[in-house]
Every structure is written in C-alpha cells, then in structure tokens.
Amino acid sequence: MMLSKGLKRKREEEEEEEKEALAVDTWWLDPGHPAVAQAPPAVASSSLFDLSVLKLHHSLRQSEPDLRHLVLVVNTLRRIQASMAPTAALPPVPSPPTAPGIADNLLASSDAALSASMASLLEDLSHIEGLSQAPQPLVDEGPPGRPTGGAPPSLGALDLLGPATGCLLDDGLEGLFEDIDTSMYDSELWAPASEGHKSSPEDGPGKEEAPELDEAELDYLMDVLVGTQALERPPGPGR
Amino acid sequence: MAGAGGGGCPAGGNDLQWCFSQVKGAVDEDVAEADVISTVEFSHSGDLLATGDKGGRVVIFQREQENKSRPHSRGEYNVYSTFQSHEPEFDYLKSLEIEEKINKIRWLPQQSAAHFLLSTNDKTIKLWKISERDKRAEGYNLKDEDGRLRDPFRITALRVPILKPMDLMVEASPRRIFANAHTYHINSISVNSDHETYLSADDLRINLWHLEITDRSFNIVDIKPANMEELTEVITAAEFHPHQCNVLVYSSSKGTIRLCDMRSSALCDRHSKFFEEPEDPSSRSFFSEIISSVSDVKFSHSGRYMMTRDYLSVKVWDLNMESRPVETHQVHEYLRSKLCSLYENDCIFDKFECCWNGSDSAIMTGSYNNFFRMFDRTTWRDVTLEASRENSKPRASLKPRRVCAGGKRKKDEVSVDSLDFSKKILHTAWHPAENIIAVAATNNLYIFQDKAN
C-alpha cells in the first residue's frame, strides 16, 4: 500500500516530511494524466481518489484534526467522486481489498453513502469537540453578541463516550470508526458503554491492531462504507 | 530615528535597493522543531519586533538608537526580551495535547512606558506587559538593605527612599489570560481601533473580547452548521478595520471574504459585504477550491483596501467593490502545473501571510525556496528576493531571483524542479514607516533594509 511521503504525520514524525524538493519523475506530473492536465479534467483517476481517501483517513487519525485541511480534502474528494463515471452498483464484497478494489467498491457505493460516511465522521468530530467545553465564561444579558460557549452539542454522546473516551482515542482509528458505525444504525439505541464501545455487527479487525495504515484497516474502512450501502441508509442532508 | 519615512515614504518594491542587514537564529542545518518561527510582527512604532515560535517562546528585538559612537549599528535590532509565552497543555477530557506554538502576536498601541502585546496559541490568548526597570529604591524605613524587616521600635528617624540606577532589566509579565472560549483552533487575533477590544477567530467562530475582562467574551460570528455533516467551509483569517471600530472582515477556505458591521446586528452571521471573485472556468481543476482558500487577509493602513493571499496569488480589493479584486499579483504561477504533486505532499495547504508597507504602495508575501516577493502597486513592478545565509554580508545588496518555469533555463535562473519546498517563507513583516522588512525563514529571522535607510 502506497503511503505518500508527504502525508501529514503526528508531530514527532513531522521532521521527516517535505525534506525533499518537488519530485520530478512521479507519474503525477505526467502531462497526459487527466488530473494534471491544464484543461478541466473530465474524470479523475482512481489514484487521485485513493490519495484523497488516504488523506482524509490520515487527517481523521490525528487526535485533533485540522478542520481546514479536513474540509478541503473532503470537498476535493466529493468533486473527484462526482466526476468519476458512475458504474453499476456492485454487491458489497467485504474481502481483503487491494487499492484498486477499494476504489471500485467505493465507486460502486452511492455518492450519498460516501457523503453520509464522511458526514458521520465530521459529526463524530463535533461530539468529540463538544466534550471539551471547559468551564464556561459567565453569561451576560446586556451587551451585544452571544456569550461564548454552549453546552456540548449532545449530552447523549457524552454519556456514551464517558469513561470510554480514553479508550476511544487510545484505539485511534478503530475506536473512531466503531463509533461512527454505531451512529449509522440508530443513535437513540446507544446503550451506556459496557466495555467502552458499542459493538457493531461488522466489528473491525479489533482494537489490538497497531494503528498503522494497513490492509486490515482499509478493509475495515471499506466495510463501514459498504455496510452503509447495504443498510439502504436514506441519503440526503439532515437526518 | 533618523530617516523616518514621513510624508515622502518612497514607493515600495523596486525603486529600492534591498540589502541584507541582520539574521537571527541558529546556523545549524538541523533545525529543532521548537525553533521554527511561527509569527513575526513589528510594533506600531517599529522600534520593537516580536517573533513567536513553535516552542511557545516570544523573542522581542529592539532597534538600537543610532548613535555616533557606533555608526555601523545603523538602527540594528537586538534582543530586548525573551519569554515563554505558552506551554504545552494537556486537555484531559479529550486526551489531547494542546500545542504551545504561537500562532499570532499583535501589539497594542503604546499608551505608557510599558509595551503590551497579545500572543495566542490554538486555544488561549495572553496579554503580556513588557516593561523596563532601570532604577531601584534604596533607603526604606521598614526594611534593611538586604530585605530584612527592621524592628519598628528601633526606628528613631525617618528617611525618604531614593531611586538609584541599576542595570536595565526588561520584564515580561502576563497580565491577562483569555482562555476557554475556543473549541477549534485560533487562527487570528486583531486589536480594535478603540484600543479596548479585540477579536479572536477560530475555524468556525469569532469572539469579541474586552482587554480588561477575561471571564467572558462575546461570540459575534458563528458558522458552525447545526449538523457538522454540512460543514463545507471554515474561517481562515479575521481582522478589524484599522479605523472603523465596528467593522471587521473574515476570510474562508472557499476563497470568500465577508465584511461585517457590528452596528447592524449584534450577531454578525449575516455579512454586510461579500467579496468573491468568480472562478475562471479555463483554469478550473480539482484543486480549485484548495488554491482559492484565503490564508491571510490584511487591511491597508488607509482602510480603503484589503489584501488577501491565496495559494498562488495576492489580491487587493477595494472595499467598495465586492465583485472582484482591483489588483491580482501572481506569486508563483509556475506552480499551477504542479498542483497534483503539491497536493500529494501537502504543500498545497501551506498558509502564506502577506503585508503592506507603511504607505500602502507596496505589498510583500513569501514563497518557496526561501524566496519572497514584493509588488509595487504604483509602478506595477515586482521582484523576487531570497533570504539565505549566502547573501548575508553586511549591507550586501540582494540580487533579484528568477524562476524558470519551463524551456531553456537561463543563467542565474532557478528551475521549478529544483525549488526546495521545505524552505517556505510563510511569515513576513514590514516596518510601519520605513523600508525595513523582517522575513522568517524556518528558524532564522532575516532583516533587510533599503540602502538609502
């Protein structure tokens, strides 16, 4: 699995990135490449799509994602996906995928499913952000503007994540995705965390795995997305 | 100081001969992450120059008074004060480390002998007072010289303490800490022209503070959608108008700028003006949105214009015209064909700042390979210069640099493919009155002056 040398890494690894000058002989620069061409490309390559998915994945793995980076990558990914020729819907194949396999399956999912997944990832971000509403400044009635800080967006999320917050973040990606997976089924039915996580029918490879980007993780990512498709989740904004 | 610009401040970029003046920072090839400079700002008089770094430290340089006994010092900047502004913090609830990196420093206008500045990391803004002490009192009645209390019954006579000179000591003390008001990462702070309030902006919200009050602030802009799944845009920079204390602007990741008037509504979620340049269909690509994202917005000193920096260009806007900028200056257009690579290595997300000169006749911004660019708005000429130790002989003139975009490379040109993308100049500052510029190149601070200075 190709891991682009330039992807953002955790702070301690940052010294290794961007030491080199812009590579000349990468296929990115192939002028025949649709993504590189000056004219508005009709269709992006699946590799550009993969790269963007990797970036999104990587961005979400940060303990506190850079929201601007995340939003720009998500928007770019949507653009790329929108330009890709739609293929016939394939039956979900949760087999260990190679990179092209993932791309095919993701292509096969509806745009709504991908949007819904990304949306849930962002929603979950929001819950996590909401947890850190520290002691609020005093509310003032008179002067203009809203006093800052409200309650966290959802106390339900707080209950769920409660003591498991540490576990959630310790697990890195797995925990994050497990939570998202749950939210797609039915948010009201979240039971207080018994072992710290709501288990889902499509439990991922497990928390024991090292949080490295590997095929098992991509497998899980794909399961989440493909699993969404299978549930016929209603698409569209606002649920 | 002699030679202050006055009314005849010369036009900016190119009629001037820029010369190396000083460089601050380690020469080491191995740069410690903590030493990377993350913000540079001149004070309102230009006598002080502050830098913040990733390690949470602030270093303030002061311009030496020109004096005849040291004619060569010629207004050099030397270290005046160094202090640890922010420390790394741990948010136990989210199990997150909050970086101590200083994102921005803004000076308050000087109102007394002491200097005040605001410095901020991702979450907390601090007001620092920097004051000098060059005298101490001697001859207390109730204390001995070594500080021990004297027995009051033994005091038979009173004396008036006298002030005696001492070695100059510069002290920095935190006077206010403005915390717990930002869920997301603070990207901007801006002091209002009323000198009483300031704004702080994060990815989704802008808050208004009173400098005296730390336990509350007012949210004036909030673009967080009800459902985070609908999030498609974040705030990237914000600034108060230099003269109208009710006006502020903020820019977005979609390349738009909104001007808000706090008089029209307490909540400025609805803008008064909306600045956006229509996309050029011929240059559209998958990266169009990313490169249109505005990384910095700065009002001109006059308050008539504002300047925005996106990935490839700097644009000057007339506040009275929302439909398009009045000027567009290309910073490094040769990168347009390399966007894919730059997306791959994340350079496309770099946030460059920009600045005006004192008379608003020139603008400056950074690029890669330790290059920085200046644009003269009156002559419409531009120049590319380099901040490097190789051109660091005192008062050595800087030679203009050229980048060869393709085809045959001429002598002295640098080809695009040999640019070093790890050497980025993100932060620059221009003295408010004179032609002196400060350029941050990773962990080094370069100061350049016009030969005539």
Image (cartoon, rainbow, N blue to C red):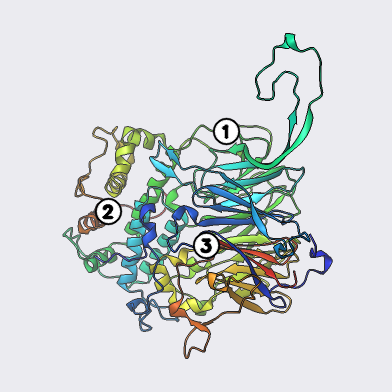
Chain identifier of the residue bearing label 2 in the image: A
Circle 1: element type: loop
- Return the x and y of residue B31 as percentages of the image width and height: 45, 59
Examine the rendered structure and indicate whether residue A8 appears above or below residue A194: below
For the residues labelled 1 and 3, the Cα–Cα distance comes to: 31 Å
For the residues labelled 2 and 1, the Cα–Cα distance comes to: 41 Å
Identify the amino acid type marked 2: Thr
Examine the rendered structure and indicate whether residue B389 appears above or below residue B112: below
In the displayed orientation, state which residue is furthest to the right.
B7
Circle 1 crowding by C-alpha within 10 Å: few under 14, some 14–19, many from 20: some
Disc assigned to residue B57: none
Residue in the picture at 40% in, 60% down: A74
Q: Check disc 2 and report the residue beneath it.
A: A228
Q: Nearer the viewer, mark 2 or mark 1?
A: 1
- Return the x and y of residue B81 as percentages of the image width and height: 62, 47
Q: Check disc 3 and report the residue beneath it.
A: B351
Identify the amino acid type marked 3: Lys
In the displayed orientation, state which residue is furthest to the left.
A95
Examine the rendered structure and indicate whether residue A74 appears above or below residue B391: above
Q: Check disc 1 and report the residue beneath it.
A: A137
- Nearer-the-camera pick, B447 or B336: B447
- Return the x and y of residue B97 as percentages of the image width and height: 42, 43
Residue in the picture at 38% in, 64% down: A77
